[in-house]
Image: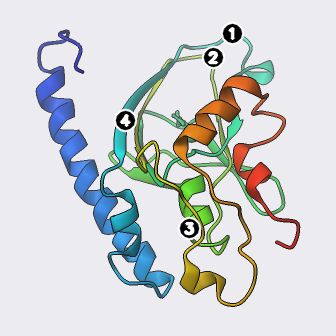
Amino acid sequence: MWPSNPPCYKDKVGKYAEATHVLHKQLIEAISESLGLEKNYLQEQTEEGSQVMAVNCYPACPEPEITLGMPPHSDFGSLTILLQSSQGLQIMDSNKNWISVPYIEGALIVQLGDQVEVMSNGIYKSVIHRVTVNKDYKRLSFASLHSLPLHKRISPAPELVGNNAPAYGEFSFNDFLDYISSNDCVQQRFIDTLKKSNS
Ligand SMILES: O=C(O)CCC(=O)C(=O)O
Ligand SMILES: [Fe+2]
C-alpha cells in the first residue's frame, strides 16, 4: 500500500525498503552466527515475515522538558533499521540512564527487538528507547520495522537453552497484538510477561 503523493514516494521509499530488507537479512545472519547458531537459523524464522515502514514526524514543541515524542518502549519485531533527521532518540543503558543517540548524517541505527531477545534466550536484550522533542524544529524518523509472520510461534533457540528451562515462554505476533489492545504497555512491556522467574 503506497500513498499517491508525493509521486516519487513509491519509487524512492520502495528502493529504500528493498535495501533495508537485504540489510536486515545480512544482520540477522551475523547475529545468528554470533550466537553460535547456523547462519540461516534466525533468517529461516523471519523469512515470511513482515516489513513496515513507519514515518514519524515530531513537530517543534514549546515545552520539550515536559513532553516526549514517543514514550519508553522496545520494538516488538526482530530488528528495526532507523534513519533520523536530527538528534532525539534516547536509549536506556544497563543502569537505567537515558543516553542520546548522536545524529550522524546518513547513518542508520539498528535496534534489536523483542523477538531476537526471546530467540536468543536473553543473550541479547531488546533496547528500551524513547524520543525527545525540541523547541526549534520538527524532527523526522524513518523506521523500517521487521517482524516474524503473524501466526508463527516464537521461542528460544533449543541450542541456546540446553538442558535448562527456557528463559521465555513461547508467543506469536497475534499474542502481542492482543496484549497491546488490552494493556497499558508503558507500565509493563509484553516481553516482561514472557520472562520465566528463573531468568
Ligand atoms: O523516532 C525515532 O527515533 C524512533 C521511533 C521509534 O521508536 C519507533 O518507530 O518505534
Ligand atoms: Fe521504537
In which quadrant of the rendered image does the N terminus lie?
top left
Label for residue 62? 1
- Would the CB of label 2 be found within 8 Å of ligand 1? no
Q: Earlier in the sequence, mark 1 or mark 2?
A: 1
Q: Which residue is mark 2?
A: 135
Q: Which residue is mark 3?
A: 119
Q: Earlier in the sequence, mark 3 or mark 1?
A: 1
Q: Nearer the viewer, mark 2 or mark 4?
A: 4
Q: Spatial distance from mark 2 to mark 3, Cα to Cα?
A: 40 Å
Residue type at mark 1: give it: Pro
Q: Nearer the viewer, residue 15 or 170?
A: 170
Q: Spatial distance from mark 1 to mark 2, Cα to Cα?
A: 5 Å
Viewed as shown, does residue 74 lie left or right of 10? right
Q: Spatial distance from mark 3 to mark 4, Cα to Cα?
A: 21 Å
Q: Is disc 2 surrounded by few (<14), some (14 to 19) or many (20+) residues within 10 Å? A: few
Q: Nearer the viewer, residue 54 or 106?
A: 54
Ligand 2 is in which quadrant of the figure?
Answer: top right
Q: Spatial distance from mark 3 to mark 1, Cα to Cα?
A: 42 Å
* Element assignment for label 3: helix
Q: Earlier in the sequence, mark 3 or mark 4?
A: 4
Q: Which residue is mark 4?
A: 52
Residue 131 in view here = yes
Residue 9 drawn above or below residue 143: above
Residue appearing at x 64%, y 31% in the figure: 178
Residue appearing at x 55%, y 86% in the figure: 159
